[in-house]
Image (cartoon, grey):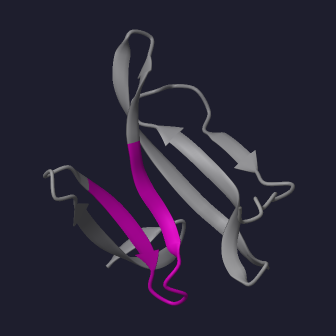
Amino acid sequence: MEKVENRNTYKLKLTTSQGVSTHVWIDAQTFLETKIEGEPRRLDGTYHPVEVYFRDYRQVSGLLLPLFWRQRFSRWPRRPQGFEILRFLWRKSL
């Protein structure tokens, strides 16, 4: 178990059939995603690892969705970026 934002989590390694791996942290109490490794982003001419944190899960049309996402760029001196979901739009089936 690892601590993520003061919560116990399980760290999982997910690998695609093409061999590409990523890590996901699952809350040990709620079993919801707490953190994932994002795709590295190019900033200041170099690639930086990205971590995406999820919280404030709420039920929307029967689904539990995180209404707050925060990105943190490793080795990037600026503050983390946070995104708050204000509204969900659902596309109707064709």
- For the C terminus, the quadrant is bottom right
- Outermost residue, top side: 45
Magenta-colored span: 22-38
Residue toward you, 60 or 83? 60
Residue toward you, 55 or 88? 88
- For the N terminus, the quadrant is bottom left
Give residue 81's position: percent from left, percent from top. 65, 38
Judge left or right: residue 81 versus residue 5. right
- Outermost residue, bottom side: 29
- Outermost residue, right side: 86
Give residue 6's position: percent from left, percent from top. 53, 72
Instruction: Kindly identify the residue that appears in the image at 56 percent across and 43 percent down.
Output: 71
Using the image, determine if residue 77 lies above or below residue 87.
above
Give residue 32's position: percent from left, percent from top. 53, 78
Give residue 44's position: percent from left, percent from top. 45, 11
Instruction: Kindly identify the residue that appears in the image at 41 percent across and 77 percent down.
Output: 9
Using the image, determine if residue 61 lies above or below residue 80.
below
Using the image, determine if residue 70 lies above or below residue 3.
above
Residue toward you, 17 or 2? 17
Instruction: Kindly identify the residue that appears in the image at 81 percent across and 57 percent down.
Output: 89
